[in-house]
């Protein structure tokens, strides 16, 4: 029997069907709330990694760390921070990647869309920084969190092509992403990095943050490459020196399954290097989870692309 995985991404996906106020059943907000209540997130300690705060405003004390189905999440982030995941001594190749988890700008899938990807890349010589960017405030109780997520995603139009979800924190996340780029580049020597091999990647809302970073940078914050995993582009024009892009999505993604092709077309129309992978099955939010489909291997494809773009070495 196939095991049901009630990860954050699965719960998000359950809230995507059209939901009138009186909706009932598993596809409606009431059904989503029932499932969330049956498998609520539990408090958990922060990761045992020394965080690098990116601002003096906000506080790490507001961040609410929880675990759902064994995977850590973070919400109510008011002070953005980087969590470095470093290669073993003597194995770093000078390339760095900042990783932005997703979570509808309400919460962050820190493990499955951050730390686990960072570990994979660090094992191959890439210095990684998981970014906890600012998100919209959610009630601290589980019921309030579930309702916040369900209500936000219930407003998502069908077949979104540009991530048309209203999220006040999207602009804050963009600022935090650019600040993270500036920090890593200015500290490249401290980490043994090539200042021209610093990339940015993200998942879902983190993928939207990635495309915002890739269209709003200056000389100090330009990513040298980007990876957008089931993300979206807000329609901003690509800069003349836009970085090469890797894009991945599952065809059966109920949230952003139609957003990657317009993104690919925008990069291709601008004459920029871009690679697109569409996996038949995987839904939304597969990240580093085992989902039993070819989507599990997106990170191998991403690493192969990094190798082809000369940001990593073949292994």
Image (cartoon, rainbow, N blue to C red):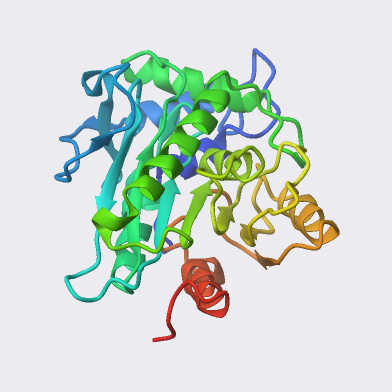
Outermost residue, bottom side: 315
Most extreme residue toward the right, as rendered? Answer: 269
Q: Quadrant of residue 180?
A: top left
Residue 289 visible? The answer is no
- Evaluate whether residue 27 shows in this view: yes
x and y percentages locating residue 184 in the rendered image:
37, 47
Q: Quadrant of the C terminus?
A: bottom left
Who is closer to the viewer here, 186 or 157? Answer: 186
Left or right for 145, reference 161: left
Residue at left 40%, top 44%? 6
Residue at image x 70%, y 66%?
273
Q: Position of residue 225 (x, y in %)?
A: 56, 59
Q: In this view, does 153 lie above or below 161?
A: above
**Total tally of numbered discs in the picture:** 0
Q: Which of 291 and 57 is in front in this view?
A: 57
Q: Which residue is painted at 56% across and 57% down in the image?
A: 227
Residue 152 location (% of width, % of height): 58, 22
Q: Which of the 4 quarters of the picture holds residue 232?
A: top right
């Amino acid at each position: 029997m196939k095991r049901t995985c009630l990860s954050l991404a699965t719960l998000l996906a359950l809230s995507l069907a059209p939901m009138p106020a009186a909706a009932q059943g598993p596809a409606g907000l009431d059904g989503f709330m029932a499932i969330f209540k049956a498998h609520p997130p539990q408090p958990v300690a922060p990761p045992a990694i020394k965080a690098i705060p990116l601002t003096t405003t906000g506080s790490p004390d507001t961040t609410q760390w929880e675990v759902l189905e064994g995977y850590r999440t973070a919400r109510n982030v008011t002070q953005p921070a980087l969590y470095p995941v470093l290669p073993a001594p003597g194995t770093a190749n000078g390339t760095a990647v900042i990783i932005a988890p997703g979570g509808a700008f309400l919460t962050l899938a820190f493990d499955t869309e951050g730390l686990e990807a960072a570990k994979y890349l660090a094992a191959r010589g890439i210095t990684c920084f998981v970014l906890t960017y600012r998100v919209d405030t959610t009630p601290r109780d589980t019921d309030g969190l579930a309702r916040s997520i369900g209500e936000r995603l219930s407003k998502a139009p069908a077949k979104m092509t540009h991530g048309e979800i209203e999220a006040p924190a999207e602009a804050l996340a963009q600022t935090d992403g650019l600040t993270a780029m500036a920090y890593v580049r200015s500290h490249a020597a401290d980490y043994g990095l090539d200042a021209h091999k610093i990339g940015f990647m993200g998942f879902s809302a983190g993928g939207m943050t990635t495309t915002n970073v890739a269209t709003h940078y200056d000389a100090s914050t330009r990513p040298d490459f980007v990876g957008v995993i089931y993300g979206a582009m807000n329609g901003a024009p690509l800069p003349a020196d836009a970085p090469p892009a890797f894009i991945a999505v599952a065809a059966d993604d109920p949230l952003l399954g139609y957003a990657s092709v317009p993104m690919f077309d925008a990069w291709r129309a601008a004459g920029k290097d871009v690679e697109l992978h569409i996996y038949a099955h995987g839904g939304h939010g597969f990240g580093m989870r085992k989902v039993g489909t070819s989507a599990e291997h997106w990170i191998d494809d991403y690493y192969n692309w990094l190798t082809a773009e000369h940001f990593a070495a073949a292994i």
